[in-house]
Every structure is written in C-alpha cells, then in structure tokens.
Image (spheres, rainbow, N blue to C red):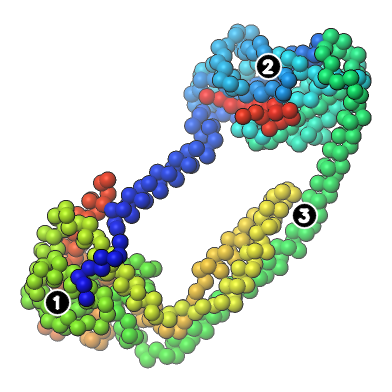
C-alpha cells in the first residue's frame, strides 16, 4: 500500500479559501438584495396627501404633503417622480412651513434636505406635470401613477385629490390595484381617492375623465372619441375585481378541504415512523443479552464513532484510533510517549493508513514518539500534507462505514412524502395569491415536513439501533467502569474519540492500578491528544491565512428618506 494516495485531492486550505469566497459572495448578494432602507434611518410615513390641480392648458399642478416620523438621526426625505411617456416633471421645489428646502436631483430621484433627529416633520413638495392631461374628442383624462411597485416605503395613510379647472361633471373615475374602489366624487367634480394604508411594492394608478371642453388650451392627444373605451375599461376592472373576490372566497372554502387531507397524511407518516421505531426498539431489547457491554458487531471503533457522532470524526478520533491499535496489539507501547509497530497486518484499510502515516511519514521509522507529531506539524511544508492525510484517513473510515447496513430504506413512506410535497407545492403559491395567508402558512409547514421526511427519513434498523443503544450510556457518564474488563478499554476509547472526555482539561490519575487497564490508556491518551491538538492548531492557522416605473405609461414613483 502506498503511504499516500496521490490521486486524492483532499484540501483543507482550498476548502477554507472556498468557504471564505462563498461567505463573501453570500454577504455581497445579501447586501445587494436588501432594500436601501436597511442602511438608512428608521422612519414611517404617517400621512401623505396629494393634491393635483388640473389646468386648462393640460398641465397639472401638484402639491404633496408628507408627514414623516423619524427614529434616530436623518438628513431628509426622498421622492421618486417618474413621468409617463410624452409627459414631463418640472419646477420641483420643497418647503417646510413656507421655508424652502434644498433639493438634489439624481435621475428621477429627488433628495430633499431637512436634517434632524427623533422628530416628526411635515414637508410640502410642489411640481408641475407638463402634458399631464390626455385630450380626446369627447373627454380629457388624467391617468397617472403617483407610485408604483418599485416604491420601497409604506404609506400609512394616503389620499389623492384631483381638482378640475372648474366645477364640472365627472365622466369616469376609478383606480387600479391599491386604488381600486377608493373613489369619492364631490358635487363640483373634485375626485378623491382614499387609499389608506398602502404597502411598499404595490401599484395604484388613478384615472379621472372630464369633458374635453374644460381644456381648450391643451394639445389634443387624439381626435378620436375615448369615453366608451374608458367606461369599458372600468367595466373590465370591476369584472376582474368581482372574479377575484369570488375566487378568494372559493379558495377560503377550499382551504380546509385541501389542508386537512394533507395534514392527515403527514400525521400518518409521523405515526408510522414512531410505530416503526417502537417495533425496532422492542426487538433490540429482546435481542440484547444484557446491559453494560460494548457492541460486539464487526465494525471498527472509528466507524462506530462516525455512526453515532452524526458523521463527524474530530481530532480526538485519531487518539482513539491509535490507542485502539495498541489495544489490538498492532502497535506496542514502549513508554508513555513511545510506540513501536509490531504488526502491520490490520483488518481495516484506515488502520494501515494510520500506521503508515504516523510511523513511515511522520516518525520515518518503526519507533514513534508523540512529540514527533508536533515537530512534523510545526514545519510549514508539512501542514497541508498533515491535513490531507487526516482527511484521507477519515474518507477511508467513511468507506468502511458505508459497507454496513444500519438503516432501513423506508422507500414507501418516503415516496408518499415526496408525492405529498409535490401536491402541496402549488398551494404555497396559490393560497397567498388569493389572499388565504393562514392556509398558506399551513401549506408551508406541510411542505417543509414532506420534503424533510422524504429526504431525511432513514430509520435505524435493528442492528443500527442495537449499536446506538449499547453506546448511548457512554455519552452521559462513567457507567462503563462497572462493565466487564474486556469492554472497559473500548468504552473509554469511544468516549475519548467522540469528545465526551476532555483529556486536556481532565488530569490523568497519579496512581494506576494493575487491575484497571483503562487507566493506562487514559494516561496514554492525554499525551497523544495534547500533541494531536497542537498539530491541529498549526494546520488550522496555516489554512486560515490566507429604468422606468411600473405604473401606467412607464411612470411611477415612491418615497423614502436618507
């Protein structure tokens, strides 16, 4: 057998570097995806009142009054104003109590400077929408998105008022999305949209139509009539809203009939798992000849540690593996810190690799001193090789472990669970789409259960459960000291290997009894573990260095602060 498998590329440094890159990339992506408000001050927009005065020349004079409640220091507020195609935003200015405020423009974002700390401020924003009115043969309409789904702030109380040039009748007035069914029309033709609370990321276009004769000085958009189309659009919006309301009600009724059967399936799978475990445990108790003995199954000590330690083999496992070879007679103890190879004919490949590594590569002779480990790992050129060899040893233990049949396949319940996940997945999307958030939450819980069950449910069979139960006492105390002598040393080595006995913190006994073999191994383990721990520190240090808006006509907007 070669002292090292050159074809394997098990790399600690590269793994650490890769992990650093992954973490950095994850943080970068997270920062990019986080909304800007995370890095700004905390605030709420308690009230927003927008007044749009329509002029006879087609312009729209807008006054917005925003009331912000700030927590902490702030520099001002922001307002995004994205005009529709063929329209423009001009003459933007801001004031507080009649005093003008400084404004900076970055594309469609306006920064209004008004600094302070922990206070409520009310700021007026004025601007003109050029060509805001669309004039047709029979009507003129103001069809505008004062905000769109790109808005990152929630309006706690939003009201939009549209005032015609003079008293008039209203040919049509309605809103879309968040503005739907919020219209109030006064006798003089003023239209008010009382939206109330509008969450961020929502659209809410408004549409108001007056007689075209009110705008004699405005440029004509088209000499074709438009009223019928506007009314037809209103009818379509109403029909869509009615259909959605009906669908929402239907999904509310269907929710229990969907979730209940899936819940019963999930409960059935859970009950099946518990019942299966009970049956297995009953058979394990029947087969066990007694309590207080180390497992006699044909499995190496490192493989047992991997099995019961969630697949993890720490540095302490090397100490146990070496002392296990001493216990088996493959390695002879010369003194507390010296060992000699007496028999290279081992049962498992990872045992041969461990001997080759420690004696041929580190000590470079048949005699091995525990201090050889630290001297070897201190040299920078050896640190990567040390890590590679440790990983190669763990992989060989893993190869042995995979040979054993310790789990049941549980194909049928896992397939049922997978099918349950496929059935549940569409409802995770459909329920919130139709406003059924309680049923959405239930479907998410079920989906997580089904996916987890289908992937992770691999119950221990009788053999696996038997080994686990026999090793369980070793994780909680020193009951093994009352076991038969032949079981005491393997029990101690198992405890050391999975890290349940800290040899660096617990001093070894000053006096040994000739009748207690485990005491000798405890002393040897303390010496070995100290050197393996130092070597790990050396290798760890080495490895660680190293466009338009989404509203109508491409318009939109939003609010914020800085």
Crowd rating for badge 1 (residues with CA inside 10 Å; few <14, some 14–19, many 20+): some
- In the picture provided, is 24 more to the left or to the right than 124? left
Q: Is residue 274 above or below residue 82?
A: below
Q: Is residue 201 above or below residue 444?
A: above
Task: Name the residue at 63% across, 17% down.
Answer: 123
- In the picture provided, is 49 more to the left or to the right than 243? left
Is residue 358 visible from the viewing direction of this image? Answer: yes
Name the front one of labels 2 and 1.
2
Of the 4 image quadrants, the one containing the N terminus is bottom left
**On residue 32, which mark appears?**
none
Q: In terms of image quadrants, where is residue 306?
A: bottom left
Q: CA distance from mark 3 to mark 2?
A: 44 Å
First in sequence: mark 3 vs mark 2: 2
Task: Name the residue at 22% across, 57% down.
Answer: 384
Q: CA distance from mark 1 to mark 3?
A: 71 Å
How far across and how far down the image is residue 48, in percent?
68, 24
Residue position for label 3: 252
Residue position for label 1: 520
How far across and how far down the image is residue 279, in percent?
52, 84
Q: Is residue 118 above or below residue 249?
A: above
Q: Secondary structure at mark 3?
A: helix
Front one among 164 and 228 = 228
Q: Secondary structure at mark 2?
A: strand
Task: Name the residue at 27% across, 80% down.
Answer: 348
Is residue 166 visible from the viewing direction of this image? Answer: no
Q: In terms of image quadrants, where is residue 153?
A: top right
- In the picture provided, is 392 more to the left or to the right than 432? left
Name the front one of labels 3 and 2.
2
Residue position for label 2: 89
């Amino acid at each position: 057998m070669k002292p090292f498998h050159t074809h394997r590329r098990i790399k600690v440094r590269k793994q650490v570097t890769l992990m650093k890159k992954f973490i950095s990339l994850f943080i970068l992506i997270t920062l990019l995806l986080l909304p800007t408000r995370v890095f700004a001050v905390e605030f709420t927009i308690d009230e927003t009142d927008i007044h749009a005065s329509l002029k006879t020349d087609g312009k729209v004079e807008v006054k917005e009054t925003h009331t912000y409640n700030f927590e902490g220091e702030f520099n001002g507020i922001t307002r995004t104003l994205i005009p529709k195609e063929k329209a423009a935003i001009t003459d933007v200015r801001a004031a507080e109590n009649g005093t003008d405020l400084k404004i900076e423009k970055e594309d469609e974002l306006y920064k209004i400077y008004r600094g302070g700390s922990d206070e409520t401020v009310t700021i007026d924003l004025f601007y003109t929408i050029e060509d805001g009115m669309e004039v047709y043969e029979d009507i003129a309409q103001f069809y505008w998105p004062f905000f769109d789904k790109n808005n990152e702030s929630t309006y706690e109380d939003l009201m939009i008022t549209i005032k015609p040039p003079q008293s008039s009748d209203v040919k049509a007035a309605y809103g879309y999305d968040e503005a739907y069914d919020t219209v109030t029309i006064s006798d003089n033709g003023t239209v008010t949209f009382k939206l109330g609370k509008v969450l961020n990321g929502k659209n809410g276009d408004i549409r108001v139509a007056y007689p075209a004769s009110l705008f004699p000085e405005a440029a004509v958009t088209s000499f074709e009539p438009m009223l019928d189309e506007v009314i037809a659009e209103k009818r379509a919006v109403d029909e869509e809203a009615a259909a959605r309301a009906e669908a929402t009600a239907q999904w509310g009724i269907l929710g229990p009939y969907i979730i209940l059967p899936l819940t019963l399936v999930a409960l059935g799978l859970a009950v099946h798992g518990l019942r299966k475990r009970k049956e297995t445990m009953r058979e394990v108790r029947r087969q066990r000849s007694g309590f207080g003995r180390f497992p006699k199954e044909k499995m190496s000590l490192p493989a047992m540690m991997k099995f019961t330690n969630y697949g993890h083999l720490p540095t302490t496992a090397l100490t146990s593996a070496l002392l296990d070879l001493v216990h088996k007679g493959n390695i002879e103890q010369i003194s507390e810190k010296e060992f000699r190879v007496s028999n290279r004919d081992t049962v498992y490949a990872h045992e041969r690799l461990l001997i080759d590594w420690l004696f041929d590569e580190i000590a470079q002779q048949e005699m091995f001193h525990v201090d050889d480990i630290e001297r070897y790992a201190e040299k920078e050129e050896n640190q990567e090789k040390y890590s590679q060899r440790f990983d190669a040893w763990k992989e060989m233990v893993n190869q042995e472990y995979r040979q054993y049949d310790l789990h049941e396949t549980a194909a049928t319940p896992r397939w049922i669970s997978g099918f349950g996940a496929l059935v549940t997945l569409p409802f995770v999307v459909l329920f919130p789409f139709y406003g059924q958030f309680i049923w959405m939450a239930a479907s998410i819980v079920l989906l997580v259960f089904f996916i987890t069950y289908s992937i992770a449910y691999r119950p221990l069979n009788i053999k696996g459960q038997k080994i686990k139960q026999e090793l369980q006492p070793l994780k909680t105390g020193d009951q093994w000291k009352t076991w038969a002598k032949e079981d005491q040393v393997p029990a101690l080595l198992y405890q050391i290997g999975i890290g349940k006995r800290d040899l660096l913190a617990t001093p070894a006994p000053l006096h040994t009894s000739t009748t207690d073999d485990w005491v000798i191994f405890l002393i040897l383990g303390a010496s070995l573990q100290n050197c393996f721990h130092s070597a790990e520190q050396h290798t760890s240090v080495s490895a660680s260095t190293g466009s338009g808006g989404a509203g109508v006509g491409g318009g939109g907007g939003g609010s914020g602060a800085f």
